[in-house]
Amino acid sequence: MKVLAAMSGGVDSAVAAARAAEAGHDVTGVHLALSRNPQTYRTGARGCCTLEDSRDARRAADVIGIPFYVWDMAERFHEDVVDDFVAEYAAGRTPNPCLRCNEKIKFAAVLDRAVALGFDAVVTGHHARIDAGVLRRSVDMGKDQSYVLAVLNSEQLSRAIFPLGDITKEQVRAEAAERGLAVADKPDSHDICFIADGDTRGFLTERIGAKPGDIVDGESGEVLGEHNGAFAYTVGQRHGLGLTRPASDGKPRYVLSITPVSNTVTVGPREALEVTIVRGKRPIWTDGVARTEPIECEVQLRAHGEVHAATLVADGDEVTAHLRAPARGVSAGQAMVAYLPDGGGDVVLASATITGAERG
Amino acid sequence: MAYLDHAATTPMLPDALEAYVAAAAHLGNASALHAAGRGARRLVEEARESVAADLGARPSEVIFTGGGTESDNLAVKGMFWGRGDAEPGRRRVLCSEIEHHAVLDAVEWLERHEGATVSWLPVDAAGRIRMDVLAGVLAEHGDEIALVTAMWANNEVGTVQPISEMSAVCDEQGIPLHTDAIQAVGQVPVSFADSGASALTVTGHKLGGPAGVGVLLLGRDVPVTPLMHGGGQERDVRSGTLDVPGVVSFAAALRVAVAEQAATAERLTLLRDDLIARVRHAVPDAILNGDPVNRLPGNAHLSFPGCEGDAILMLLDAAGVQCATGSACNAGVAQPSHVLLAMGADETLARSTLRFSLGHTSTQEDVDELIAALPTAVERARAASAT
């Protein structure tokens, strides 16, 4: 097949491209330039989106022996990922930009362009498996990225190749070294690629503007402190709340909800975070078949989060997960991903965007 | 494989390669006083005389440098400082809007860091420098001008400029003109003396010589402040031990390029006109950019409306046809060409261009390969732009 390998400059995508070439595909490497100004995103070892990353990717492509180009996706990335990220926080939700990037950039804008240019598929270095159109978890549970890929529909999955799903991250690094790829020891990227210093709150404050408001105790209604913008908080958060007085019961407080309309952050004790019913919208069925009967499955409610046994009930555009045991820290805006446990790698059944959660 | 990017670099001529290898076997620092040094110096000075003869200059006007970018920087910054030292009131630089970045960025640097005032000379839709604007600026600011810099022929769209006309009007007011003739030498006749320019840039690897060797032809009476300080090997204007094999090879390449210029130009013009006609037949809405008549024989620069030049380039590359978008990159991301923008194109059209440039090894088969691959590439690139 004629395939396009998205190369970030990291070790995973470099090995993925090499494996695709070795498998006999006609591979072309492409680095996606996502920053409007390549110098402004993070630099050095924390890595992605920099000039250095682009050069690392090019160097890897040269070693693999494949053509390499840079595609300017900065405008699309800003509209579909960065602006969306800011708007979601402003609306009191907690988005996952990696997921949005897969859905809107890598397997939409890039894939569409690739197909138009005559490519059959897009190769990425994601840790996940795909066989016969079925998306499964990676063998490396610690690095598994099926959660951020669960937003892909069957058509997108049919044009995706993930060559790394059957090896661990450690094996990827060893293989990179064997192949003479200089990125073998390059540190993993963390956090959010477009927030240079890792200061998400600062990034959001700069874009949304400081909006002081109250931090209110959900049980007593007492005002326990002031915040500079409700958008900077995430459900389940305990640290950095800046409470000026303790709650009446003397117990630590956690963020229970964010209400942008009244600019209020509501906090409460840990047990108040517990939910057993999680509601979502816009289900995406990875095999393209919408389920109407309740399904016994496992749901994951955030990236690298634990899984919960649940019954999933879908009704048109709405999905509800009834959890067997309570989950904590469930944020609107995150994805709820349903898995079917399987010895050959848990199968991704569907994803939906979380709209709310409650105690059943 | 079809190589249609000779304006980026062209294969070394056999004479140049042979001369390089022979000279590289010699020991000797051309500045040393002993026998080995004398031997090296003889090679360098013979090369200098040969270069001077081929470019209508005197040997003492030939300054060997490390390439075109160095020659351009030395001319632009060195002449600005040199003239400014003699006459502090002269802090204005006139520069065409279509210069190569080696000139453009040097001028912008002078503006930012050295207090230069810049008058940008616009071009018409065919990329010809507006002589009326030049005359106007000269009339208005003649006594403030340190130098004028304008390229002999544009590297992207191939338009050839009326350099001797320009130097004549500059000369009336005693203002020196520098011209970047990198693309011109070997393609059109170039004589330093006839041009009337005060300084002229040439580089080796665009005419069949090695990369990393260039020349600045510099009039004896033109004051220039050096950029690099050291041994003062080249007329005290340029320091650094000379690259003897590079210089010898440069001279050998130039000798062939100039001797064969007329024949090469005739052959390449025919081949290029055939290329343009067949591209237009294959892609009827393709637009030829640059001056249709006064253009470099090897240059075909075309816009493909509705396509990104980058996308066509990638598809042609996959089909074994190598060409360029002709525009500069920022971190690998193609920017709309400043030359096309100066010629009045909008950003979208300025991104839709490709440059096919022919050289001494180009053949009819190269053009055939391009024409075979182009229609599919354009069709797909158009579809990709629509996504």
Image (cartoon, coloured by chain):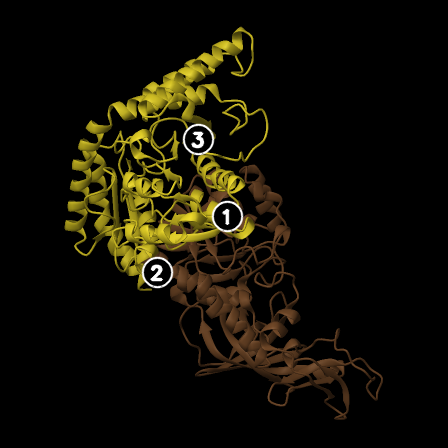
Chain colours: A brown, B yellow
Which is in the foreground here, disc 3 or disc 2?
3
Q: Chain of mark 1?
A: B
- At label 2, counting other C-alpha atoms closer than 10 Å, the crowd grade (few under 14, some 14-19, many 20 or more) is some
Q: Amino acid at mark 3?
A: Asp
> Would residue B80 be found to the left or right of residue B325 on screen?
right
On screen, residue A92 above or below A128: below
Which is in the foreground here, disc 2 or disc 1?
1
Picture coordinates of residue B275 (x, y %)? 19, 42
* Residue that badge 1 annotates: B89
* Label 1 – label 3 distance at C-alpha: 19 Å
* Residue that badge 2 annotates: B347
Q: Is residue B322 visible?
A: no
Q: Of the residues under marks 3 and 2, which one precedes in the sequence? A: 3
Q: Is residue B255 visible?
A: yes
The quadrant of the image that shows the N terminus of chain B is top left
Q: Of the residues under marks 1 and 3, which one precedes in the sequence? A: 1
* Residue that badge 3 annotates: B221
Say whether mark 2 and mark 3 are on the same chain: yes
- At label 1, counting other C-alpha atoms closer than 10 Å, the crowd grade (few under 14, some 14-19, many 20 or more) is few
Residue nearest the observer in this picture, B179 or A220: B179
Q: Amino acid at mark 1?
A: Gly
- At label 3, counting other C-alpha atoms closer than 10 Å, the crowd grade (few under 14, some 14-19, many 20 or more) is few
Picture coordinates of residue B375 (x, y %)? 21, 50
Q: Amino acid at mark 2?
A: Glu
On screen, residue B283 above or below A301: above
Picture coordinates of residue A335 (x, y %)? 55, 73
Residue nearest the observer in this picture, A349 or B375: B375
Q: Of the residues under marks 2 and 1, which one precedes in the sequence? A: 1
Q: Chain of mark 2?
A: B
Circle 2 SS class: helix
* Label 2 – label 1 distance at C-alpha: 38 Å
> Would residue A6 be found to the left or right of residue A227 on screen?
left
